[in-house]
Amino acid sequence: MKIAFRADASLQIGTGHVMRCLTLADALKAKGAECWFICREHPGNLIDFIRSKGYTTHALPLRVPAEANASAKVTAASAPEPAHAHWLGASPQQDVVECARILDDLQPDWLIVDHYALDAHWEAALKPYYRKLMVIDDLADRPHQCDLLLDQTFGRDAEDYRSQVPVGCTLLCGSQYALLRPEFSAMRPYSLQRRQDPSLKHLLITMGGVDKDNATGQVLQALRSSELPANCRITVVMGAAAPWLAEVRQLAEQMPWSTTVRVGVSDMARLMADSDLAIGAAGATSWERCCLGLPAVMVVLAENQRQVAQGLEQAGAVKVIQSPQLILECLPVLLAPLISSSVQRAAMSQTAALIADGSGVTTVIQHLEF
């Protein structure tokens, strides 16, 4: 079976779309599939990283800077475009032409698309070049011409997509389908077991692979106003392309608690399992934390993360800060009861563990006709 992925990472998009596609590609490769990636050369892309994982990756040149594309979208008098069309770095027509050349040569059994800037028009234009199409989405804000659609948002219902997809499209909706690497399900028993005695000795900060607004730095500054235990240690995880990395390292050296900044982490499951509390972005790592029962304070870094954060907060799995601008004000207030109450941390852990169990990849692959 031949499978092509169309996904991008950038300073604006973040890394989550590519990372979850890599998780799926690794599982498909283990089943004997051949996988390729098609990615545009945005600033902050992960093309070299994907190649380092052993996947042939076709790089598309950046045609239109995001800012220019966004301005053009406002004045264009054409058909409605996706709300995130400016994330594409090219016109949809350019993207179709460039992808068609690659897909015509590959002739994949499945094309898997994870991109908020692409919709049914793009998918239909490329229909001659693939046998079936899978879309990975989180927004339910535009139509798709696909055979299979995955939305791993907690609380998402298939009815949210029914009018957006063809009759007969298989809809996999909800956090039980979250695409998590196998090490998370492997670490789950250990992680849940150690939370039966919920001490607070290790705080984990993960604000995404890019963190373009330096939420990490704001978190470190806000922690100075908290009353973390004196023996608590802090681990900060950042991406190699994070623009504020140097500043965060300087802040870490000045913290009252032992604070380590790690880049290019390859053992995130173990790191999360060994942590007692997390402060993190409301992105794809939400499901990783849930799988391991890791209680968290979650920061909404982008509008498309708001529904995830709201659902998890209503369930009682996280505490939420609604924007990076509120970190300094809200974080010490939200942390105070979590620091003082092991009972509250344990309750959050138990709730989170019910939301995702790490079996999503196995379930999704069953729908790809192996």
Image (spheres, rainbow, N blue to C red):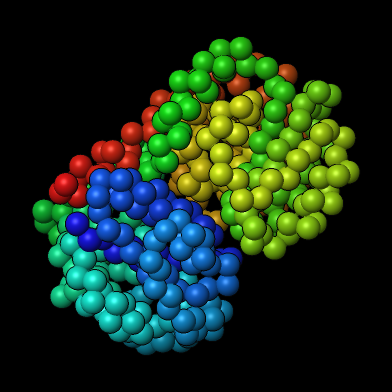
Nearest the eye: 172 or 253 = 253
Lateral position of residue 184 relative to residue 364, left or right: right
Please give the name of the residue rendered at 76% of the width and 40% of the height, measured from the top-left corner. 260
Q: Does residue 79 sit above or below 357 in this rendering?
A: below
Q: Does residue 130 sit above or below 324 in this rendering?
A: below
Question: Do we see residue 112 in this rendering?
Answer: no
Q: Position of residue 254 (x, y in %)?
A: 88, 43
Task: Determine which quarter of the picture holds residue 233.
Answer: top right
Lateral position of residue 268 relative to residue 146, left or right: right
Lateral position of residue 326 relative to residue 247, left or right: left
Seen as rendered, the residue at the extreme top is 197
Q: Position of residue 262 (x, y in %)?
A: 69, 46
Nearest the eye: 183 or 68 = 183
Please give the name of the residue rendered at 77% of the width and 52% of the height, measured from the top-left corner. 248
How many labels sit on residues? 0
Question: Do we see residue 27 in this rendering?
Answer: yes
Q: Position of residue 310 (x, y in %)?
A: 49, 41
- Could you tell me which quadrant the N terminus lies in? bottom left
Q: Does residue 248 sit above or below 68 in this rendering?
A: above
Lateral position of residue 92 relative to residue 346, left or right: left
Q: Position of residue 34 (x, y in %)?
A: 27, 58
Q: Does residue 236 sit above or below 68 in this rendering?
A: above
Nearest the eye: 58 or 289 = 58
Task: Determine which quarter of the picture holds residue 80.
Answer: bottom left
Please give the name of the residue rendered at 46% of the width and 81% of the height, measured from the top-left corner. 61
Please give the name of the residue rendered at 83% of the width and 33% of the height, measured from the top-left corner. 257
